[in-house]
Image (cartoon, grey):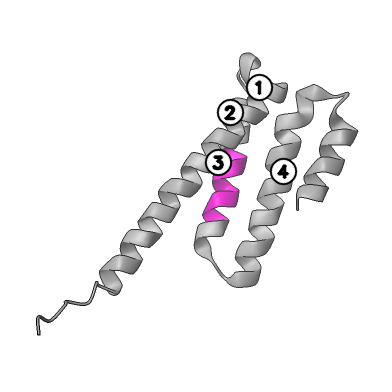
Amino acid sequence: MFAVFAVIFTLLMPIRSFAMLAFALVFAVCLLGGGLQYKEPSMLWEAFLTLLFAACMSWFAPLRGMRGMGVLMILVGVSMAIIGAFRLRRFLRVNPRPQEIEA
């Protein structure tokens, strides 16, 4: 996946204004493909959120180009951490820690 990003960013480096949208599109397609393959709804939500963040940020002129790509990476990382925390919480509720018995 890193190779795909490297090639796309190398080709799009002269057109820096499209860097954020290219990152969002490639990342969303990867998440969408993985979510459909593994039947994982959280990956589908991440693909949707990535496109939503990119669409919202493309309206703001200061957040276009490389700066916008950095902000988008941070937003995607934060949303992944939040979704991961909810999944971990649900897992821990279903699988509680076993009680230790004193001998």
CA separation in Å, label 1 and label 4: 17 Å
Q: Is residue 29 left or right of residue 10?
A: left
Q: Give, as a single range, the part of the protein colored magenta.
A: 44-52
Q: Secondary structure at mark 1?
A: helix
Check if residue 67 falls in the magenta segment.
Answer: no
Left or right: 54 as drawn, with respect to 99: right
Rendered residue at 44%/54% (across/down): 84
Closer to the chain start, of discs 4 and 2, is: 4
Q: Residue furthest left?
A: 102
Question: Few, some or many C-alpha atoms within 10 Å of disc 2 (few <14, some 14-19, many ≥20)?
Answer: some
Furthest residue to the top? 62
For mark 3, what is the residue? 76
Residues at badges 1 and 2 in contact (C-beta under 8 Å)? yes
Q: What kind of element bears circle 3?
A: helix
- Residue position for label 4: 25
Label 3 to label 4: alpha-carbon separation: 13 Å
Q: Which mark is residue 67?
A: 1
Q: CA distance from mark 2 to mark 3?
A: 9 Å
Indicate the quadrant where residue 97 lies.
bottom left
Camera-near label (4 vs 2) is 2
Residue sitting at x 82%, y 35%: 9
Residue mark closest to the camera, 3 vs 4: 3
Q: For mark 2, what is the residue?
A: 71
Quarter-of-image position of residue 90:
bottom left
